[in-house]
Image: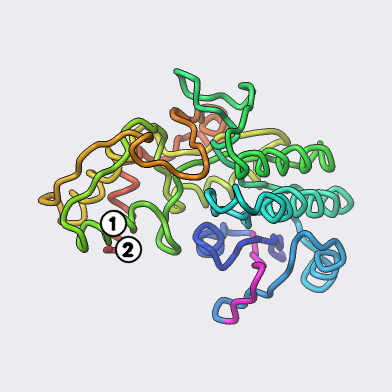
């Protein structure tokens, strides 16, 4: 019996590379990215170009589903390049969703906690009101809506947050580097979320593709932390517990894009689908440290 072929976008990136590594039995993954990566047999395709995506579907398909992990993720730069971010985060979703609807196959779209304004006091549920504060958040929300409009019976939106993993640039890796270079750090303590590793998220996305229904899901590691909490835990596990880390406020560390102050996600819907939660964030961090050894 032949495997079900699934298109994974953003396959050369932090999340996409993990999606390719953990393909479940019964599935075969075909990766693509904006730029070709011959090392992992990933062709370059502009997903906002309908003709290019249609050609990809014809050349590498037929597909049994798509996991769309590609995105414009430069949160601060998006404030200057919102049109470019919209093209990558919204227009590409519309193109993919239209083709998936035509083929009657499921589409999993990876989204973000940045669709919320952070004014909440309890973990955000999938049906809570959205109110993005940044260009990045607006373009990701536009992508969610485009996918659901074009493919209401097959689009699954999976919002996640504070992502890191064995490949790519991310907060824990940066903290380890800066701790070694500077010997002392100041880290924001008044933004709270759930640090999430691709090691946990990637298998969950495959489960949503295989077993989920159309709609919105939240996917994050269990528990919550501030950026300062995450920095301290990372340094402790990386053998850098001696490095002093001083908490500071968001106001003391201004960035072009406004971040939600509180964006913990309620992931009970996903846990019910899978029969388990993602790992607690500290355990997931330990697992990443053991693999990546930063």
Q: Which residue is mark 2?
A: 292
Q: Nearer the viewer, residue 184 or 44?
A: 184
Relative horizontal placement of residue 241, taking residue 194 as reference (left or right) = left
Other-residue count near label 1 (Cα within 10 Å), few / some / many at <14 / 14–19 / ≥20: some
Foreground of the two, 222 or 129: 129
Q: Is residue 267 above or below residue 119?
A: below
Query: Is residue 88 or residue 83 the one in the foreground?
Result: 83
Residue 34 on the magenta span: yes
- Where's residue 109, x and y in %? 67, 46
Q: Which element type, helix, strand or loop, lies under badge 2?
A: helix
Q: Position of residue 203 (x, y in %)?
A: 52, 50
Q: Quadrant of the C terminus?
A: bottom left
**Which picture quadrant has residue 222?**
top left
Residue at point 52%, 52% (across, down): 202
Residue position for label 1: 289
Task: Determine if residue 264 is in view.
Answer: no
The x, y position of residue 69, in whole percent, is 61, 54
Q: Classify mark 1: helix, strand or loop.
A: helix
View extreme (left): residue? 242
Residue furthest top in the image: 121
- Colouring scheme, one of rainbow, by chain, secondary structure, one colour: rainbow
What residue range appears in magenta?
27-38
The disc placed on residue 169 is none
Q: Looking at the image, which residue sits at the far bottom?
A: 38
Q: Quick check: 125 above or below 220? A: above
Q: Are marks 2 and 1 in contact (CB under 8 Å)?
A: yes
Q: Is residue 208 magenta?
A: no
Residue at 50%, 45% (x, y): give it: 256
Residue 8 visible in the snapshot: yes
């Amino acid at each position: 019996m032949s495997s079900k072929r699934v298109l994974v976008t953003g396959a050369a990136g932090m999340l996409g590379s993990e999606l390719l590594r953990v393909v479940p039995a019964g599935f075969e993954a075909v990766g693509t990215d904006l730029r070709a990566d011959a090392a992992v047999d990933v062709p370059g395709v502009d997903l906002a170009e309908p003709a290019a995506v249609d050609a990809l579907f014809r050349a590498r398909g037929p597909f049994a589903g798509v996991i769309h992990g590609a995105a414009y993720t430069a949160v601060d730069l998006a404030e200057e390049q919102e049109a470019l971010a919209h093209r990558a985060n919204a227009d590409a979703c519309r193109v993919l969703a239209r083709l998936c609807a035509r083929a009657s196959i499921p589409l999993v779209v990876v989204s973000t906690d940045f669709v919320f304004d952070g004014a909440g006091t309890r973990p955000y549920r999938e049906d809570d009101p959205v109110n993005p504060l940044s260009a990045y958040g607006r373009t990701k929300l536009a992508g969610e809506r485009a996918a659901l409009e074009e493919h209401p019976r097959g689009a699954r939106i999976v919002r996640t947050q504070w992502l890191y993993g064995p490949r790519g640039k991310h907060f824990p890796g940066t903290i380890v580097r800066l701790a070694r270079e500077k010997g002392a750090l100041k880290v924001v303590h008044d933004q709270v979320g759930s640090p999430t590793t691709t090691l946990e998220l990637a298998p969950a996305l495959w489960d949503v593709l295989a077993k989920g229904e159309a709609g919105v899901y939240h996917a994050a590691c269990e528990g919550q932390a501030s950026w300062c909490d995450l920095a301290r835990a990372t340094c402790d596990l990386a053998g850098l517990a001696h490095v002093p880390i001083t908490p500071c406020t968001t106001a003391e560390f201004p960035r072009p894009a406004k971040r939600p102050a509180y964006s913990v996600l309620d992931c009970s819907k996903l846990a019910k689908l899978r029969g388990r939660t993602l790992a607690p964030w500290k355990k997931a961090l330990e697992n990443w440290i053991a693999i990546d050894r930063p």
